[in-house]
Every structure is written in structure tokens, then in C-alpha cells.
Amino acid sequence: MIHPIDTALSLVILSALFSFASSRLPGLIKVLAFQGVAVSLVPLFIGHEMTSGGVSFTLTTMIIRGVIIPLSIYLVIKKVAIRREVEPIIGYHASLLAGLVLIVAATYGSHKFNIPSSTHPLLLPSAITLLITGIFLLMTRRNAIAMVLGYIMMENGIYLVGTTFSVRAHHIVEFGILLDVLAGVMIMAIILQNIKQTFDDVDTAHLRTLKE
Amino acid sequence: MDLFFLSLVIIILGGALPLSIGRRFAAMKTAAVAGIGAGCLLGCIDSGFKLSQTARFSASFDYLKTFSLLFQMDSLSAFFLVIIFAISFVATVYSYHYMNSPGKSFRTSVNYFFFSLLIVSMALVVTAGNMIAFMLSWEIMSLSSFFLVIYNYQTAENRRAGYLYLVFSHIGAMSILTAFGILYGYTGSFGFAGAGSITDTGKILIFIFAFIGFGSKAGVFPFHVWLPHAHPAAPSHISAVMSGVMIKVGVYGILRIYSILHFHTPLFGEMVLIAGMVSGILGVVYALGQSDLKRLLAYSSVENIGIILIGIGIGMIGVSSNQPVMAVLGFAGGLLHVMNHSLFKSLLFLGAGIVLQKTGTRSIEALGGLFKNMKISGATFLIGSLAICGLPPFNGFVGEFLIYLGGFKGVSLEKTSFALSLLGIVSLAVIGGLSLACFSRVVGIVFQGEPRSPAAVGRDEKGPTMLISMLVPAAFCILIGVFPQVFIRSAVKAVSSLELGYGRIPLEPFMEMTGNITRAAMLFLAVLFLVLALRTFLYRNKPVSRSGTWGCGFTQPTVKMQYTGSSYAASILDFFRPVAPRLEDHPLIRGRFPQKTHYRSSIHDIAELHMGNLIIRPILFLFERLHWIQHGDIHLYIGYILLAIIVLLFFV
């Protein structure tokens, strides 16, 4: 029988691949919301004993990850952006190919970390995949909102890494990170509006003109 | 809790409280002065008591289980603590009437906060017992003094001075860190204890790096460039603390490193002695050429650090050539000069502060005749000037005389040590003569004569706390000069914690000699005052006509006929032209009815001059070449971060 974590993690990796190929912002946001929910499900099945507090923490995380953050970003693009394209520097097909290579590299690289074998074998590779995918999106998408989404994807990866090396105070640490991200998203929303006002666009290539 | 930490807590509270009541100027100032002053007084008494008891004491704090902060006090620390707390106390009292702009209420409270941080961090530096505690306090000291320097940040000149200071203090800190890093590499612990057992190469490397680092804080030539910029920029009581005390912390660092390395090679002594001679002579030459009163005093600090280093250098040579008497005389003389210089230099800076506050100018050539209305400031400034020239019966003489005696002990040595001891004596004499010229110039131009500009006309000296806080160090200058025994003994006690293992050295004959000279000088002064009194008595009822100084019998003298500071110094400075190039701006006078003309001269500091050509320009050139790294593309910046992570993860 297939373990529920395997299902969740394959969905996560699938969503990462989707994000490589999605060309429009609303689609990318939906992929991200889906990914957030999938990632938040993982701790429920990982085999730690769950207190009611832990479960409620996980559910709160899921709501923030899956609903609040995507929704606020969606509202921002409704308010600000005219163009819904993610404006890639590297094309979608090339991105997809690079994504496949990155997954292989992540799986290979995860063996370098000597983690205890008791944890789930797929957990660390998919976490690293998410991290790298996030950085990849940050680097290869010129649209500022797409970059924010990449950043949030990195955070999802960090969450998975956190579950891998889970400690007792795991939820509290995770909650702290989440609050950081939430604050980060709020700040980015404001900055985005400013960029939009200044350059009449949210293309980060314009920021080059600010250089001395 | 120990009294030492209690006093630190009081000082910090005294500095933090004004931040909350920053709007009410008078209340804020009172709270700050009372808190910081009380803490300093308590600390001074406590450390003086510990110095006389030779009680060792230590306290350690563990931070995050990994970094333990260790503080301990021996007689060397206690000696420096007495100076730090005493001078800070005087400066705090002075500030009550000196900081008199209610419009800058909040800024003044911030200034008090950083001032309290500076005092506490200096006290912690000299008590630090391991590298982490030392570096932490050292950095707090550098940063808090940086914020004090840029108090008047509106002027571009002050901002530049602050920037220069920040750069220099971090280069120095980097050098100290390098020394500590080497030490850690050998011993594997953050403590200083195991430093005595490492290899000789390691010790030499550590000492050289530490000397550069501490020397740049102390203002040793050629690392002094920041000093004449930063010290004048700060408010005067801060300049007094920085010039009187903070640069001495650098001297403390050199002594401490020397003591923990416990390596008695002649190399260290020669290095320190040569550095001392160079900064002593050049410092006073540049001081002589300055026209800015506070800048002059700052250069004079470079000179006095030179004298202190000559003393320490002679002490080190004495240790390496097994001459206990010479060693103790050198070290004790250097330490005593540390104390003396902190007294008279802070006194002079406070005097310069009151002149600056009342006249609004720091330019010597614009002042004159201030003695007529500023009797107390003038008299204390004169006492400070006499003391800094090393004349008996003031305190400067006692310290320098011990160094002389140590040097004369070294004349009986061989080869290099002989030559260096002799050179040390000669340069001490040269420094003494030049500083006499320098300070006779200052006193003569600023306080004597007639006002050279409207700024100096009819100034009073109001502000009781300022006057009191100048009278106290002046009184101590005389006290140490006349009764040096107890102070020499405490300096010798501080030397004992260098752990040279000499036991008791009989210093009574030297004290006797010092005492005789002091008595002779007092006799001379007594005769002088007697003659003055006689003159007043005999001329009691006779008509005395008065005319302006430098009037020279002209019917209509103008103030422009007076001797100027530049002309007074010019003939001496001509001799030092190779090391002190002079820039003159003086259009020639032509024709029978010459046009209006002017004369302007300034002395260049060769260290500053060559620093630009040899160091800054190549660095700028290099970074111009690397400018393409900063291209402004956010995606590639993220790429840099990724690259750094990958390198850190897989290759480190």
C-alpha cells in the first residue's frame, strides 16, 4: 500500500514541476496554494505522536500557507499588475528540463547530508527540490510577483527540511518562520505598489536604473 | 555584586535615563551628570582602593554556553581604571555647563548615553580576561566613541572625521583580531593563559599585529591620521576623555599583550622605542604647526603617546638585557606619564572647550588677550601647559624624569641597546624643547597679547562646573609634581602585574633625586612670586601707565602688529621641512601703493599625505576594476547568494 507521505511528497514535486511551466501569475498562485496544503499535510503522517495542540498548529499553518498568503498575493496582482505574464528569462521548456535535472541533483545531493535513516527517504530530496526550485524561480523570472512566489516556495522547502530534522519545539519554530514570511509578503506587497508607481510596471529589470 | 560592576551599572543607568526624559533639558542634564558622575566616583574610589590593596578579583559570565565572558582585575587594570573613572568624572561634571543648547535636547541625551557606554566599555576593556570579552568591549568602545565624534554631524568636516575614525578603528580592530586569531590557533582557547608557551615566531607575529592594532587606537605614527581629525570634532569634554583616556587603552593593550606573551626579546623593546621616538618628535612638530587649538592638542597627544612608548620601550629593553632597575624605571615612568598625560591633556582640552564656547572659534590666530577676563581658565591652562612641557614642579616632569633615569641606566649596555637608549634620551630632550615652544606659543597667543579679532573681545568665563572641573585636574598636576611618592609607588605596583619577577626594586634614590629637583624648582617659583609681590608693594602709590601688549611705543598701534603664532613657529618648522612640508599662500607685494594682501600657511602631515597616494589610491583603483560585480541586476544577485550557499555547503 502506498504511504500517505509518498502521495503528499509526489504531489509536492509535481507542483514544483508545474510551477516551472506555468506562464501566468494566477496559475502559479494556484499551484503554490496547492503546494502549501500538500506540504502542510506531511507532518500529520510522519509518525510523531500528535497532540491536539500540534494538530491545531498544523491546521493553522495549512490555512496560512494554502489560503491567506496566496489570497493576499492574488489581491495584490488584481490591484497592481496589468501584465499577468511571469516574463521568464529562461523559457518554459528549458525551465522544465532544468527542473528535471534539479530534481535529480537534489536527490543526489541529499545523500551528502548524513541524516538518520529513520526519517522518510523521500522527505529530504523533495525539500531540497523545493528550495532549489524557489531559487530558480527567483533567478529566472523578471516579474516581481513571480519572484515573491519563488521566495514562498523556498519557505515551503525550509518547512519540509524542518519536519525532517524535527525537534520537540518544531511547531513553535515553524510558526515563527511563518510569521516572518507573512510579514515579508506584506512588505513585498507595499514595495510592489511602489515599484509599480515608479516604473509603471513590476519588471525588476527596471531596478537596474537605481544603481549608482 | 562587586562594587566595580555596581558602578558600571550606575553609569549605564545615568546614561540611559536621559533618553526617556530627553525633552526636559535641565532635568535630563542633571540626571545624566548625577548618574554618570556618581558611578565614576564610586568606580574611581573602588579601583583606587583595589590598587592599594593589590586585591585580585575576577568574575565570569557564560553566554549561550559557548562564549564565556571573563573579567578580572589586577593592579595594572586597577591603575588604568583609576585614570578612566577619574577623568570621566571630571569630564562629566564639566559637561553640565558645557552642553548648553536646549534646542538640541534629544541629541544631548543621546550624547550622554553614548558617553556612558564609552566609559563602561573602556572599563571593561582593561578588565577583560579573555579574547571574547576583550573584543566585545573594544568594539563597543570604538563604536560609541564614533557616535560621540559625529555629535555635530551637520558639518561635512565632522562627518568626514567620523568616517575616517570609523575606518581606522576597524582596521585596528582587524589587526587585533588577527593577533588573537594567531594566538587562538596556537592555544585553542579563548583565554590568555597559554600564550606564554607558544613558539617564538608566533609570539613575534602576535606582538606585531597587536602593536599595529593597539597603536592605531593609541595614535602611534603613522597610524595616528584619524586622531587630529576626530578629537577636535567631538564636543570638548568628549575630546578630553578620548585624548586623555581612550587612547591610553591602546597603551594598556600593548602592555597586556607584552605581559601575556612573556617573551623577552630585544626586538619588542626596539620596535616600541623607535615607534615612540618617531611619534613623539613628529607629533610635537605637527602640533607646533597647527593653527586650530584642538587639533594642536590632538597632535600633542600623539607626542605624549610617543613619550609613553619611549618609557615602555626602555622598560622592555631593560627586561631583555636583564637590567631590573632600568626596566622598572622605564615601565613606571611610562605608566606615570599615562596618568599625568590624562590629567593635563584633559585639563587642556577642557580649557580649549571653554575658549571655544565663549569665543566661538578654535583658530589660535583669531584669539588673544583672553587672560584678562578669563583668569581661572587662563591660570589652569597655563598650569596644564607647564606640566605637559615636563617642567618641574609639575607632574609631567616626574614621569619623564623616571624615563630619563631608565634611559641613563641603559647607556651602560652594549651596541644596539646603548645606541637606542641614548637616542631615546636625546629624543626625549628634543620633544621637551619643542613642546615648550609649542605651548609657549599657545599660551602666548591665545591668553596673552591683545584680542586679534572681535571674537576674542570681552569674554567672560561663566559656568561654575566648567571652572571646578578644570581646577581639580590642575590641583592634581601640582599635587603629583610636589608629592610624587605615592603615585610612583602605585605605578610600580601596576608594573608588578607584568609578572617580570623582580621582587622589590629600591627606587628611593631616584625619588630623592626627583624630590631635589622639584624643591629647587619650587624655590625658583617662590623667588619669582616674591619678586612679583615686592614689585606690587613698591609700586603701590606710584603712577603706572599701561598700554597694549606689542604696542612697541607706536602712537596708534593696531592688533595686527602683534606677533603671530605662525611666525613664532616658522623658524623651528623650517628645520623640519622634510617631514613637515609647509604650504604657503602669499601673493607678493608690488608697487608703491600695494594692494591688500594676505598670508596663509599650513603644515602637512606626511603620514596623511602619503596615505592617500600609497594606500587609498591603489585600493580605489582595485575596486574600480571590480565595479562590474555590482551591476544592479537582482537576478544575478540572487545567483551570488546561491553560489555562496553551494560553496559553503559542499566545500567548507
Image (tube, helix red, strand yellow):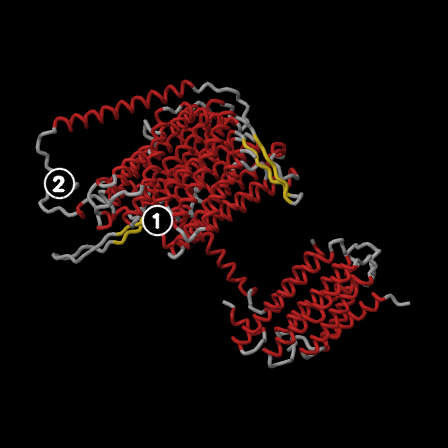
- Residue displayed at 49% across by 22% down: B324
> In the rendered structure, which amino acid carries the disc numbered 1?
Asn
The image quadrant that residue B466 belongs to is: top left
Q: In the figure, residue B273 lies in which quadrant?
A: top left
- Given the image, what chain letter belongs to the residue carrying mark 2? B
* Residue of label 1: B100
Residue at horizontal 27%, vertical 54%?
Answer: B585
Left or right: residue B73 versus residue B404 is right
The residue labelled by disc 2 is B547
At numbered mark 2, what does the secondary structure look like: helix, strand or loop? loop
Q: How many marks?
A: 2
Label disc, if present, on residue B627 of the rendered structure: none
Indicate whether B155 appears above or below B5. below
Query: Which residue reaches farthest right?
Result: A1
Query: Which is nearer the N-term, disc 2 or disc 1?
Result: 1
Q: Is residue A71 left or right of residue B457?
A: right
Front-most of residues B199 and B349: B349
Res B629 visible: yes
Q: CA distance from mark 2 to mark 1?
A: 36 Å
Q: Is residue B538 above or below residue B207?
A: above
Label 1 chain ID: B
Find out whether the residues at labels 2 and 1 contact each other: C-beta distance under 8 Å: no
Q: Amino acid at mark 2?
A: Ser
